[in-house]
Amino acid sequence: MTCTPASRLLATAVVGIVALAAAARSADGQAPQGSIPGVDSALIEDLVSAYRILADQGVLDTYGHVSVRHPTIPDHYLMARSVAPADVTASDIMEYDADSNPVDPRGRASVLERFIHGEVYRAHPNVKAIVHSHSPGVVPFSVTNVPLQPLYHMASFLWVGVPVWDIRTVKDPTASALLVRNIPVGKSLAAALGDKPVLLLRGHGNVVTGSSVQQAVTYAIWTDVNARLQLAAMQLGGPINFITAEEGEALDKNPGDLNRGWQAWKKKALGK
């Protein structure tokens, strides 16, 4: 069969595409780091941004983590490997199964407390994203009898109540370390969260949930701000006029534009 110039050009193009695809794969035959099957790169970018934003805002320290439910495998989730939040990149994002086992670790170390995320996703199908932080403002409310309540309209979502979970209620040998290291302890935490968006962990920090990674990040930031404002108001003395249930419910129906804050925080944290 005669090979025309056009057919030779087409054959060369096909070979080139195959070669590029092969080069894009890692030596072990897996997809390149920074890509996860069934996950759009934009979602991974948002998750990386979430880590960077919360670190920049002082909500996450060198520990703490953010996750998002897998968009096509609902009982799986995505979270960064064990690395400081301010340093997270797309190649650090890993997929976890329903029992919080890494799907494709590639030698990357997992966060010890990933069971917080796995068990909250298992127990609460409506939750799409989770932030666990050691947010300094909230810790005093986890170790005293003073409840965290909304006095700031941006944190009106707290009007439904903020439960406090004490790991000592779990009869597990790992509980004394104050870390959620396994499924049984994670199940206890998820049960204590109930239908609330925020849960405090005694002497540890908090868990914040959302219907999207943008909402979870926004809630985590405003929860810490509200806690700091409440502490300041308490120091002034006298009764505090908190957001009422009626006001909180009304504000829930008109939450405002999440993207406005997200874009501003993202620009500050990542320069874009």
Image (cartoon, helix red, strand yellow):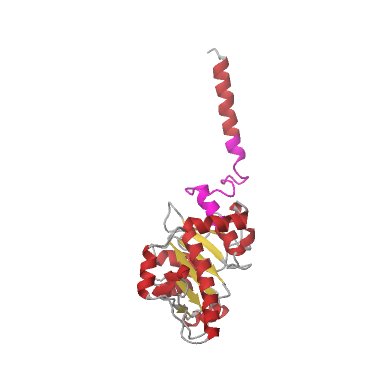
- Given residues 88 and 7, the one toward you in this image is 88
Total number of numbered discs in the rendering: 0
Q: Of all residues shown, which one is farthest toward the top?
A: 2
- Given residues 7 and 54, the one toward you in this image is 54
- Given residues 220 and 70, the one toward you in this image is 220
- Magenta region, residue range: 20-49
- Given residues 141 and 245, the one toward you in this image is 245
The percent coordinates of residue 266 (x first, y second) are: 57, 56
Residue drawn at x 39%, y 71% is 248
The percent coordinates of residue 58 (x first, y second) are: 60, 67
One can see residue 105 in this view: no
User: Compared with residue 255, is residue 142 higher up or lower down, i.e. above or below?
Assistant: below
User: Compared with residue 80, is residue 63 higher up or lower down, i.e. above or below?
Assistant: below
Q: In this view, does 86 lie to the left or right of 188?
A: right
One can see residue 20 in this view: yes
- Whether residue 38 is in magenta: the answer is yes
User: Compared with residue 28, is residue 259 higher up or lower down, i.e. above or below?
Assistant: below
Residue drawn at x 58%, y 44% is 29
- Whether residue 24 is in magenta: the answer is yes
The percent coordinates of residue 39 (x first, y second) are: 49, 49
Q: Is residue 240 left or right of residue 32?
A: left
Residue drawn at x 50%, y 56% is 260
